[in-house]
Image (spheres, rainbow, N blue to C red):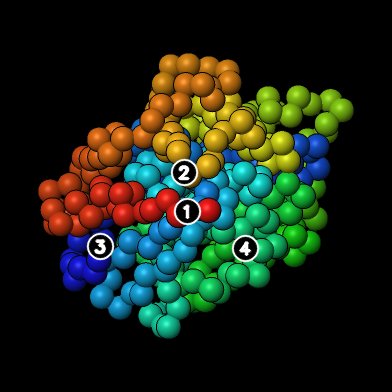
Amino acid sequence: MRIFSAFLGTFFFWSAVAGACTTAAIPQSLNKLMVKSYDWTQGHGMVVVNKRNVGKKSLNFHPDATSAEWTSKYGSVTFNQHGREFPLGGMNEKGLAIEIMWLDSSKYPAADERPTVNELQWIQYQLDNYESVKEMYEHRDDLRVQPIYAKVHYLACDPTGTCSTFEYVDKKMVAKIGEEMAVPTLTNNTFEDSVSFLKEHKGFGGEKPIPQSEASLDRFVRASSLATAFDESTHKPVEYAFEILDSVGPTDYSKFHIVYETKTRQMNFRTREYFHVKSIDTDKMDFACEGTKTQMLDMGAKIEGLVNDSFVAYTPEANKAVIKKSLEHVGSLIPPAVVKAWIGYPETTECKPN
């Protein structure tokens, strides 16, 4: 669906002020931990179990965009605040984890012959199609991101402890992988600028003390320092990971914290409203498309511990409710046809026969 519109600047109502997210990895940990603090104005959402072998066509509202088409190879579990198929992050059944952060300096490429996805569906596409960061890196230029509104960049990590950044700088995809990265951390400045600032500080070649403010570059240094200091023999991995998130995401804008264990494919998260940790064992999820229903879980559910058995069948009504809540401040600015297409998009996907 292509719609000429002036609503694009308000579609998700994202704001760089509240978009102070932090993602970091601890590659020396046995379970290859990756952590995320989601800092935003809203904290609602649903956890979605995405099936393998599902045919999809990307949702675009731009007249110059050619939709991407694919069939998911891998199942995944994602955190969705803007509806099913448009995740903020997640992990697939192979242990590939991806997270998104705001990057105000992002400059996206002009239209070309490549198929397009929007800035959130890019995450789902990667989780659907690739099992490693190396694969993502090798295919980094296959697609063009045509953003609906958000200026973002991404950090991805896999069970080998390999991580990669993906950013649009001066209208080109710029990616760093593995040993090219001084640290596997990302906040809200470009990776290059962040690393330059990092090198001024103790432990990374400089003399400045580790900063304690909530500014993007300061969070980058602090998260990197804490992640580097992790020692499996003296720290409890998941508890320590949440301590890092306590340090970089302590404000009222920090709506939820996530700890991925990519090697064992475990997910742990907590919300500001209910701080007890929920855990998901993705190995015990049913990702088969045929004969099963898509499953979902309210992120704010007041439960704790292993929550696999608390997932319920996905419904279009639940998806609509999540999207409507995300649009509380801007819903009247968006054409009804756009809202309808967005809400109904999951029903355009199709289970493919084996």
Residue, disc 2: 290
Residue at 76% from the left image edge and 45% from the top image edge? 27
Q: Secondary structure at mark 4?
A: helix
Q: Reading the chain from its start, which is encountered first: label 2 or label 1?
A: 2
Marks 2/1: CA–CA distance: 7 Å
Where on the picture, by quarter, is residue 164?
A: bottom right
251, above or below 307, in the image: below
Where on the picture, by quarter, is residue 76?
A: top right
Residue, disc 4: 136
Kind of residue sitting beneath label 1: Pro
Residue, disc 3: 8
Residue, disc 1: 353
Give the camera-side residue of 197 and 234. 234
Q: Reading the chain from its start, which is encountered first: label 3 or label 4?
A: 3
Q: Sort mark 2 into few (<14), some (14-19) or many (20+) by Cα contacts within 10 Å.
A: some
Camera-nearest label, 3 or 4: 4
Camera-nearest label, 3 or 2: 2
Q: Reading the chain from its start, which is encountered first: label 3 or label 2?
A: 3
Q: Reading the chain from its start, which is encountered first: label 2 or label 4?
A: 4
